[in-house]
Image (cartoon, coloured by chain):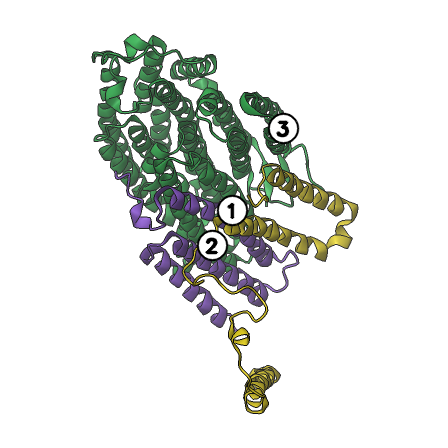
Amino acid sequence: MLSEYLPVLLLFGLAVAFAVGSLVVSSLVGPRVPNPTKLAAYESGNIPLADVRNTRFSVKFYMVAMLFLIFDIEVVFIYPWAVVFRELGWFGLGQMALFIGILGVAFVYEIGRGGLEWD
Amino acid sequence: MSPIGPLLLATFLFCAGVYGVIARRNAVLVLISVELMLNAVNINLVTFQNLLYPGDPAVTGQMFALFIIGVAAAEVGVGLAIVFNMFRNRASVDVDDADLMRW
Amino acid sequence: MQIDFIAILPEIILTVTALLVLAADLALRGDAKQFVNPLAGLGTVAAIIATVALWGSERVTFGTMYVVDDFAVLFKLLFLGTLLAILAISWRYIAEHRFFQGEYYFLLLTSFIGMLLMPSSRDLIMLFIALETVSVPAFVMVGMRKRDLYSSESALKFFLLGVLAAALMLFGMSMVYGFAGTTDLVGIAAAISGETASVPLLLGSVMLVLVGFGFKISAVPFHFWAPDTYSGAPMPVAAMLAVASKAAGFAGLVVVAFIAFEPVADVWGPMLGVLAVLTMTVGNLIALQQRDLIRLLAYSSVAQAGYILIPFGLARTGPGAAVVNAAAIEAVVFYLIAYAVMNVGAFAVAIAVERRTGLRSIADYAGLSGRSPLLAMGMTVFLLSLGGAPLTVGLWAKFAILEAIAVDITLFGIVLAGFLVVNSVIAFFYYLKVVRTVWMDEAPAGLPQLQPGFNLSAVVVVLMVGTLVLGVLPGLVTDFSSVISIVAAG
């Protein structure tokens, strides 16, 4: 039974070898001409103003993530429906329309109360 | 395939979750521990379904797991909102700080 | 695949009402927002009519997941009646405290939809969904006073313990599923009864499932959330948690214990009996020392949960068990109805007093008889009834439990009856203490007269009359509660 996993193991080894190999080869072969712009954290972006590690995120990020999460997860119920949707026919379609309709009401409410506005 | 492996994993996850709920003082970490417990339940259900009752046409165990995933998401949403609100009011998410009321 | 829409009509009506409330909350501005309350009330009345029409019928739908029998209809009427009373007592309270009104009523309705599902569930998945639909909106409602430290703290405690109990229950359910291969309650009973020797793992799982319901009914090892949550939550929410949510927990417990786990009743029966003794004793002893009326009501409701657990302690399996179990279920249902009538009333009076004065310690009820005779009368009747005084429904509720014990007298039953009597006497101390404060003590100077609004007065009067009329003629309810029997639908 374990032999069935041999290809996976091989693939795993191959991936590691490729990653390590390219790192080693590029560090050996590549030319090195450092200058201050290149050494900045984001080569073509803004220079960071402060240390990023200990700054706090705005709570709004979490709010948006939460709202997304709830709507995202409820969609999980569409998967089992999709599996048997031919057998359910129009009845199933109606039920799913109801389900999405109720989700839609919640979504309209969320927008109406300004849940997705950033300020 | 023997169900022992997945069931052991589920039990381990569940125990880790229980330990986290009891020992952790940070409300967010307690919440994560509860999620661990719920995922242990999901592993249990899917294992039983696939290895012990593969012939069930209603795939009960997997359906149950889907419902748990859905409800767990709602719980986390509500729970994080409560924790944030707590944090806004007293600038701490430590469970031990919630001690205004005793007896 | 056919769905019996008549059977789920009450739930559909409540769902539509909840969505309408949400829409109305978006559309209305300012003071007009309080009119979502009568909208919710209309929906509730419609749902009550739809439920009454289901009395006497027996409908099975969603496969065998969902059963509407007289047991379920009686519970649904109990929930909807409570909902109507809670809507009436929250109108002014919520409007004045500048709550999120639309959200409050939406969450309230959603929570009650879960309760309506509970007594009809005949499947572990359905029970789990119903339980969570009751709980999750309740978590939010408790924390609704966003800037209040007590409110957010009680919400956190309620939430953490709630999800922990749910997780433990789910683990038990998953093990039961692994054992039985089905989540159908009847199927589980069949699978369990096939086992001659009890498997420890199975019994452990059964206990875990019961933990989830033990949390909802605030039975003793899981009661810590109750006093803190009741005193931190907005008061109508506390009333809903103390009455409706608890009744829903008991409905689920009856269904899962007496249908699915009936073959192992000789294991969980004595355990729940011991739990009942612990619950009422601990609840009463701590209630004796409370100075805050809401906390006193909270511990009293813990103790009442102990009384209601007694019939579960009588459950047994084997020949002749059907009679005993039926009597136990009947006692539970009757006690819950009586409990709802008197406890909602007590909370209504407490809301009226707190709304006007912002005070809630027992000392602040001094001289209530002079400040508002109606409220003082109401409080007296409700508290005496909770204690089980003659001429009130509370006495008959306790009597129903004794009657269930007397169906088949065992030593354990006698012990339970003894604890019930002793605890009732202890409980009288603290109920009478409040009653004495209301009538005997001088009112502190400067407290205003109380003028409860029309809705609240109506609720207090109706429930007071109900308590007294049922105290004289308990047959009005027992005529219905004695004919019910749970339809298993396999």
* Residue located beneath label 1 in the image: C128
Q: The residue under label 2 is which amino acid type? A: Phe
Q: Is residue C190 left or right of residue C296?
A: right
Q: The residue under label 3 is which amino acid type? A: Ala
Same chain, marks 3 and 1?
yes
The label shown at residue C27 is 3
Q: Colour of chain A?
A: yellow
Pointer 2 local density, CA inside 10 Å: few below 14, some 14–19, many at least 20 = few
**Where is residue B37 drawn, in percent x and y?**
44, 58
Same chain, marks 2 and 1?
no
* Residue located beneath label 2 in the image: A57
Instruction: Answer whether residue C250 is visible to the viewer in this image.
Output: yes
Q: Which chain is green?
A: C
**Where is residue C428 drawn, in percent x and y?**
24, 24
Q: Nearer the viewer, residue C243 or B58?
A: C243
SS state under label 2: loop
SS state under label 1: helix
* Residue C403, quarter of picture: top left
Q: Is residue C66 left or right of residue C316?
A: right
Q: Colour of chain B?
A: purple
Q: Chain of mark 1?
A: C
